[in-house]
Image (cartoon, grey):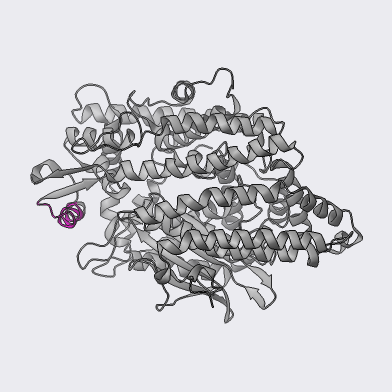
Amino acid sequence: MNSNPLLQDTLLPPFSKIDNEHIESAISSLIDQSKTELETQLAQLGSQPSWASLIDPLEARSDRLSKAWSPVSHMHSVVNNDGLRAAYQACIGKLTEYSTGLGQNEALFKAYQQLADSAEYSQLSAAQQSTIEQALRDFKLAGVSLSEQDKARFGEIKSRLSELSTQFSNNVMDANQAWYFHTEDETLLAGLPQMQRDIAKQTAEAKSLQGFVLTLDIPSYLAVMQYADRRELRETMYRAYVSRASENTVRLNDEEGPWDNSPLIEETLQLRHQLADLLGFNNYAELSIARKMAKQTDDVVNFLRELADSSREVAEKDFQELQSFAIAQGLQGDLQAWDLNYYGEKLKQETFDVSDEALRPYFPAPVVIKGLFDIVNKLFGIDIFEEPEADLWHEDVKFFRIEKSGQVLARFYLDLFAREHKRGGAWMDECRVRRKTESGLQLPVAYLVCNFTAPVGDKPALLSHDEVTTLFHEFGHGLHHMLTEIDVAAVSGINGVPWDAVELPSQFLENWCWQAESIAMISAHYETGESLPQDMLDKLLAAKNFQAGLQMLRQIEFALFDFLLHRDYQADAPVDPQRVLDQVRDEIALIKPPAFNKFQNGFSHIFAGGYAAGYYSYKWAEVLSADAFSYFEEKGIFSSEAGQWFLETLLSRGGSEDIADLYERFRGRAPSSQALLRHNGMA
């Protein structure tokens, strides 16, 4: 047996055995092996490929490589270090070259086409037919029909884009961690809740410093923005946060670092446009939606602008109310960007007599997790059990299995807390995909990752309600991956699902964070065990749509910026992204950030993630998710019948059928945006 753990076919990744020196040799070996096997396979296919002779071996090879790369890519995000980063970067180009070569293999494309035209095709399952149809589309989008010269250029672009994406993400992480605010004067922290001060003290101790340390990690940063009475402190933190990875990056002790993402953005946009041009598209936005529900770029732009128009009146009232309140509170001068969350939180407390910090003691992480598991049990009939003996990458991580009627369906890792060397944000990713193998059924395994406030001392982690909602969101993604009944990897779970529909299950599950019956299941005071009192529950629900108009416009601003940036790019006269953002803000935003705000330089979703010309997907899918939840409002929010129907028609089907057809089967009609507007208090 090969001693390299990445080359061993294990049920789960052996995280504790993976060393940095294993990575490049394993990935290179698997790529070389796969290339050799593909050549042999194509030579032996004959004139009429079958599913068994063509796709089964391809899927097995893809899965073998994925199972080796998945833990590497994951650790690069959650336990980053210099050696791992170097190994990751050494492999990413090889993987891109390999996948591009597969997509441009004319013999392989011809074999897929022959199978699509064969008598066997009509006998295949819907999942198998979708796999073939999507593969034929993806061959064309990978440049299989290009000239050899253009194929080579296509491959160069794809490889460089992978490098740029990795560097963008690294720059954000490095700039984030290279700055912190240190003080021994506790009076500067006036207004911060005691828990946040305890965390700041704990962070200082970890750095061998006296006093308190505030960082740019989201739990620390947001606490300052919401609660710090010292306006100078809020401004200091804000300037450091919004200038990350830009020419304005605020450095600690003049520390140097090549973190400016501006040239990376410029090159990325240029290369994406070239890629689209090679494939015959007018712009990258057209290329992006070729795999999405939206059919035309105008459909996306019109959708966003119509949603903005529906939100504007409410948003204007939100802003006027906030301005008036801040002045009444004694604000001197104009309302600045670093004042918005602070006065917003105070206004929410005054209006609804509720605050995130007052709610935290009622949402200890263990209670929230158990309540979440109980809710999905009611909806989908699944049971979740912890497996404490799993091989993990960090002591904070937990591992679980999902069962239904005593049968194991899936497993998942749960990594909840922010820490150094961990990428910010929250996400679900695939560890193992459900598929049929020669030895039986491979069950899906997911990574679920968040960046919440960690436990302090002997207290459990106490979550804000926003963090609770984030956990439900990511778990919705996880259920989409893990409760699939599709056995073909290419369309199993989230695979093959259009990107502007992939957020449907995640945003759908968020709705249970706002129902009185479900809140009772996810809340209990960490000291007394008391459920969230009725008066606090009433206030929380009353505050649900607080500043919903402003929040809606903010997300539309991001989405429209992303889409117009890619749709309107001109190769002969590229526009500065800042200018595009400013124009979008002039059209959409009611609150204009200061000039030093370089939001785009940290916009990892579109420059280091899968959302390029696709950030609109959040709002597009939110229409679907709100409309889907309205079905449960009709049937009962814990209706097992409704839950099973949602599972049967949508959640379990992966990318095996057209998502529009699946949705209409579930709802009995096309989706309507009325539920979204109603849920946000705008209808």
The percent coordinates of residue 195 (x first, y second) are: 20, 55
Which stretch did the figure color magenta? Answer: 197-210
The answer to which of 585 and 629 lies nearer the viewer is 585
The residue at 54%/75% (across/down) is 11
The residue at 57%/39% (across/down) is 614
In this image, 419 relative to 37: left or right?
Answer: left
In this image, 568 relative to 110: left or right?
Answer: left
Position of the N terminus, as image quadrant, is bottom right
Which of the 4 image quadrants contains residue 283? top right
Task: Using the image, determine if residue 203 lies above or below residue 343.
Answer: below
The percent coordinates of residue 361 (x first, y second) are: 27, 60
Residue 328 seen in render: yes
Which of the 4 image quadrants contains residue 638? bottom right
The answer to which of 25 and 516 lies nearer the viewer is 25
Q: Residue furthest right?
A: 119
Task: Using the image, determine if residue 674 lies above or below residue 658.
Answer: above
Task: Using the image, determine if residue 127 lies above or below residue 274.
Answer: below
- The magenta stretch spans residue 632: no
In this image, 263 relative to 651: left or right?
Answer: left
Position of the C terminus, as image quadrant, is top right
The residue at 33%/68% (across/down) is 395
The percent coordinates of residue 572 (x first, y second) are: 58, 18
Residue 299 seen in render: no
The answer to which of 377 and 679 lies nearer the viewer is 377
Q: Main secondary structure of the magenta part?
A: helix
